[in-house]
Image: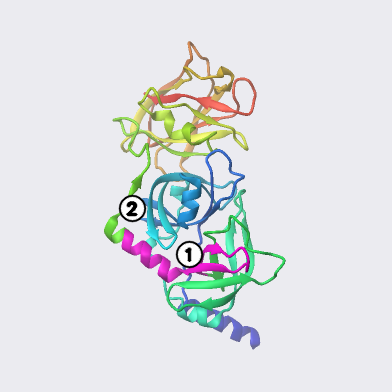
Amino acid sequence: MKRAGSLLCTFMLSLLWPSIVPAQQAVVTTHDSAAIEVGQAFLARHGSDCLAILPQHVVQEVGRPALLREGKPPLIGETRSAADLGNDLAVLRIEGGISGACGAGALSIRRDIARLLQQGRLGTLRSVNGDGTIAQLAVTLVDDDGHSLLRIQPTHPDNPIRKGLSGSLLMIDGIAAGMLLSVNARSGIGTVMRIDALLARVDRHLLTAGIGTTPTPGGKPAHASGAQVLAWSSLPRSEDYRAANLLSGDENTPPWITTPARWPVSVDLQAGEGIVTISGITFDTLGLEDSGQRPAAVEIFINLSGEPHGWRTIRSAALEYVEGIARVEFAPLRARQIRLSFSRPADGGVTLALRRVALH
């Protein structure tokens, strides 16, 4: 009987307090080192855009953040544009693999948490580790100003709120109640923006100013055909050596250089506007500082539907370079997306470099 009453209570609470996420979160890091966990971000979708909502001071610390979404292996994304919403809150537009699994619609996320805060004083800070796993820290709600800010402290003094947790979600009974903005170094008390106040700011921005007031380089398709880099499985050596450089039409743009944590490493390309026909790919390594870092072989996949399970392999080939250029030809095929998977560099080392790719 007691069990039935508990289930009924849980059901009634789910009606009163709908789940505010499917909690899609990401750890904020740098392009050159996924081991540096600078902060956390909450992911939401607005139209065709993937948004990351996080503290502004985290954005300022990194400059142009890279993000690793929860899951194994974690999906990678990077910033395309950023907007400062005030009160240490920012919203970023994200591109890369993250954009295909970004979370709920920003304008559809529920805000009604008044009953939740009245009922619950215990919660957890939910965050993402660098390997994509989830961490949770038990906390106690100690103050609520009634409209925008909460204050929390660790339930166990031996488990403080550490640096790098700014942007974590405060969860109460499995529901997102707010986002951690900062922690007082002396008292250990964290300041949290309530989810209703946070999303009200995001709403105003999306409905008035549009997404992103600070554009970042490389926002347009690489060339007139509409081909563009969609996703990549490894962070670049630094921000200068991004995967997006592979389709740059500027001769002065650096190559893509990465030191993967795991092999093979892959890059996904939008083949063009809609479905296009391709019959070959050119791999350009001209001017690389170390030719031993160029790919030794490639496995090529195509995706006609654009769906996550729509990939099929069409060709595996050793890359034979003539004056820094290698070409792989095949019978004409229709494709929406192309995946290039590299198992190793030519010298068998740990770093892979490629200047440009071209579809034809």
Residue 113 in view of the camera: yes
The three-letter amino acid code for the residue at tag 1 is Val
Query: Label 2, on which residue?
Result: 211
Compared across the picture, whether 39 is left or right of 103 comes to right
Q: x, y (%) of residue 18?
A: 46, 73
71 inside magenta stretch = no
Compared across the picture, whether 4 is left or right of 283 comes to right
Q: Which residue is rendered at x = 49% and y = 11% of the image? A: 322
Front-most of residues 81 and 60: 60
Vertical position of residue 307 compared to residue 177: above or below? above
The kind of secondary structure element at disc 2 is loop
Q: x, y (%) of residue 200?
A: 37, 67
Vertical position of residue 325 compared to residue 233: above or below? above
193 inside magenta stretch = yes
Furthest residue toward right? 158
The three-letter amino acid code for the residue at tag 2 is Ile
Dot in front, 2 or 1: 2
Q: x, y (%) of residue 112?
A: 42, 75
Question: Which of the two discs, 2 and 1, labels the residue nearer the N terminus?
Answer: 1
Query: Label 1, on which residue?
Result: 21
Question: Residue 270 has which mark?
Answer: none
Q: Residues within 10 Å of mark 2 (few under 14, many from 20)?
A: many
What range is drawn magenta here? 176-205
Vertical position of residue 37 compared to residue 345: above or below? below
Front-most of residues 167 and 101: 167
